[in-house]
Image (cartoon, helix red, strand yellow):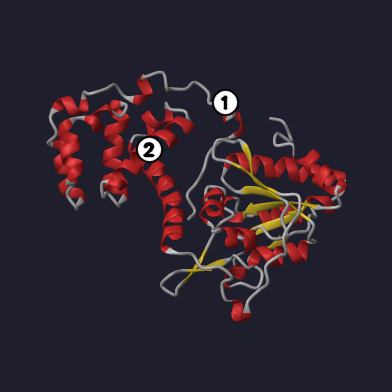
Amino acid sequence: MDMDAIALLPWADACAARSHCAYLLLDGAQAEGSHLRLGAMRVPYASLFEGKREEALPEIAPLLIDLTALDASRRSRVVSWASQLGFGAPCLSWYESPLALPAFAAHLRNFHQVGLSDGQTMMLRWYDTRILPIWLQALTEQQFALFTGGMLSIAYVDRFGESKTIHRTDEAGPPSQQLPLDRPVMELDDRQFSLLVDAGDLDALINHLKFVIPDETRKLWPRTLIEFAAKYQQQAMAAGLSDIDRQTQYVLLALYTSGRGTEHPAMQALMANPPNSLDGYYAAMQAMPADVWEAGEPLWNRGQARCTEPGEHMGTAWRKNM
């Protein structure tokens, strides 16, 4: 594997040439013990849990690292190590900023919690890279400007091992300011909250499918499985299947028939008024005529199976740590 497959070293050099800082942000919950590894490499970092209730949990803290503050040897070691982590779990994003480490960390800590419409607060792990792009999409224009204050670019490794830049600007806005009593600087409405919850629900469904049919799901490319499952999960949710268990039953039918079974008139009738309980829904599925389950061949038999997923040698995998 290329020791710098994401080209973070030339990116950091370019940031330094512009007199800016190049920051890596590691989600420690998906790469536990990262603080110990950084300490062993003598690499300074800022924990985004500092000053928060979760400060007592350094092993799962999000860690901010300034690459431009490191000598060439340590920078190379950190980039090689962090890149492997990013390909193995949804934990790595990077940011260009004119702010020094203490100031940039203080800005990011302001988004540790968000307010909700019912007056409650919620810790938000926006640095989980399954959540990060959804988080930015969910924000209003004003909220987006607040969050991206002090940032010139945001990029991350997606679940397929590809680097994506999701924000770039020529001029950074002002950083956010902490509110008295550490109140959340941002409040999400119900629509925004739902978008973030849905982002986690897809991972829960994928994990459930891998548990129920492990051999079959291993035959599919990760991208194929995720995109297919997402499509049919959305159909299930639109029909009122709000729980993972009933969604799984629906997506299993889709997988075993390449989606054709979901188009059968008997299945369409069921989804027009699905039973509210898992037992009732499961019984209704089992009572479907045989031609529902024979409407199409399994997805893994339709040229969607894999020998090796491009980039799989990089250790593509993800874990749910919502």
**Separation of residues labelled 2 and 1 (CA atoms):** 22 Å
> Which image quarter: residue 11?
top right
User: As rendered, which of 170 and 213 lies closer to the eye?
Assistant: 170
Identify the residue at image location x=34%, y=42%: 233
Rendering coords of residue 254 (x, y %): 30, 32
Farthest bottom residue? 181
Q: Residues within 10 Å of mark 1 (few under 14, many from 20)?
A: few
> Which image quarter: residue 45?
bottom right
Identify the residue at image location x=43%, y=22%: 305
Horizontal arrangement in the rendering, residue 16 relative to residue 306 (left or right): right
Farthest front residue? 141
Front label number (2 vs 1):
2
Horizontal arrangement in the rendering, residue 35 relative to residue 313 (left or right): right
- Residue with the mark numbered 2: 231
- First-in-chain label (2 vs 1): 2
Identify the residue at image location x=29%, y=35%: 252
Q: Are marks 2 and 1 in contact (CB under 8 Å)?
A: no
Rendering coords of residue 69 (x, y %): 84, 54
Kind of residue at disc 1:
Pro
User: As rendered, which of 61 and 35 lies closer to the eye?
Assistant: 61
Question: Helix, strand or loop at disc 2?
Answer: helix
- Residue 103 is labelled as none
The image shows a total of numbered marks equal to: 2
Task: Tell me if residue 216 comes above or below residue 109 in the rendering.
Answer: above
> Which image quarter: residue 261?
top left
- Residue with the mark numbered 1: 310
